[in-house]
Image (spheres, rainbow, N blue to C red):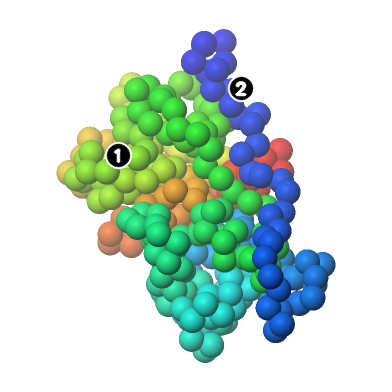
Amino acid sequence: MNPKRAGLAALAAVVVTAGAPAVASGSPDSTLPDSAETLPQVDMEMVLKAAQIDPRRADQAPTPGAKDSVMAVEQALRANGLLDQERVDGHYGTETVLAYAGFQRSLGHEGMAASGFPGIDSLRRLSENRFEITRTVVPGERSKSDGETVNARTKAMLAEAERLTEQDFTLEQGSYNPGGDPTSAGTHDGGGVVDIDVHGMDAVAVTESVEALRRVGFAAWHRTEEQGDWPAHIHAAAISDPDLSTPAQHQPGDYYLGRNGLADQGADDGPPVKPIRTWEEYRRAN
């Protein structure tokens, strides 16, 4: 086996979802439940999914399976004076994004750390005496792949996609690269996003690569030269990576809604993969 693939494949066995629910401590408010056993549970996986999809929807419908968790988060934001009661509806729309960003700023976060997209640290702070967190998602430590920076979750996902296709991907651009490529429109500023070189791949190999990336939890597309000011490549954004930049958050949301992840919000032009799964969902299914 290729040494690079062997090393990356080992990473695919690492589960980067923390297993134990986080229960915050503190002095109970008299209006809150008397014990941790009565606190509502917030599924972080579902909250992240809703935070990507709901702001891209044309209606106010909640993401299936996410409503109760999102409502518990919204109730906590409401208790902090950051969200109107009428917005406590289980739909993680623009007002909830703004409210959560306000909470992140109250913790001293700024920039991408105050985008309104929940990370485990801010979610734990918000949860104090209000809800328990289950199925946490963390990006993991950053390292280099093909000289490009990615986090542990993304690296494990790439390794599994390589295993499925029996190919070695070469990264043209990694994550945490603010301003590195103006044509990327900020999607690579945070974590979870990579561009893959398609030089030397035929059309079948490109399609198989996009399909494998989608199967393991990426919103992935073959970007052609006709679509923008860039060489042909595969663009992949790891669904529900807590470090996604705001523009990158929009791409998985659009992917769930059958769009191409570009500014024109055209129809998805990639190979259909159903059901759409996150990395954590893929691991549980396999």
Locate the C terminus by quadrant: top right
Question: Image point 60% across, 59% down: which residue?
Answer: 124
Give coordinates of residue 154: x percent, y percent: 49, 37
Q: Report helix, strand or loop for mark 1.
A: loop
Query: Is 22 rendered above or below residue 96?
Result: above
Using residue 141 as the reference point, say whether residue 194 is left or right of it.
left
Quarter of the rendering containing residue 224: top left
Give coordinates of residue 10: x percent, y percent: 61, 22
Nearer to me, 138 or 12: 138
Give coordinates of residue 237: x percent, y percent: 43, 45
Name the residue beneath numbered marker 2.
10
- Looking at the image, can residue 116 be seen? no
Query: Is 279 rendered above or below residue 7?
Result: below
- Looking at the image, can residue 119 be seen? yes
Query: Is 84 rendered above or below residue 232?
Result: below
Nearer to me, 198 or 156: 156
Q: Residues within 10 Å of mark 2 (few under 14, many from 20)?
A: few
Question: Earlier along the polypeptide chain: callout 2 or callout 1?
Answer: 2
Quarter of the rendering containing residue 47: bottom right
Using residue 152 as the reference point, say whether residue 225 is left or right of it.
left
Q: Report helix, strand or loop for mark 2.
A: helix
Question: Image point 48% across, 45% down: which residue?
Answer: 238
| Whole-number angstrom distance, CA of label 2 to CA of label 1 | 25 Å
Nearer to me, 39 or 268: 39
Name the residue beneath numbered marker 1.
177
Looking at the rendered image, the disc whose residue lies closer to the viewer, 2 or 1, is 1
Question: Image point 35% across, 34% down: which residue?
Answer: 174
Residue placed furthest toward the bottom: 86
Locate the N terminus by quadrant: top right
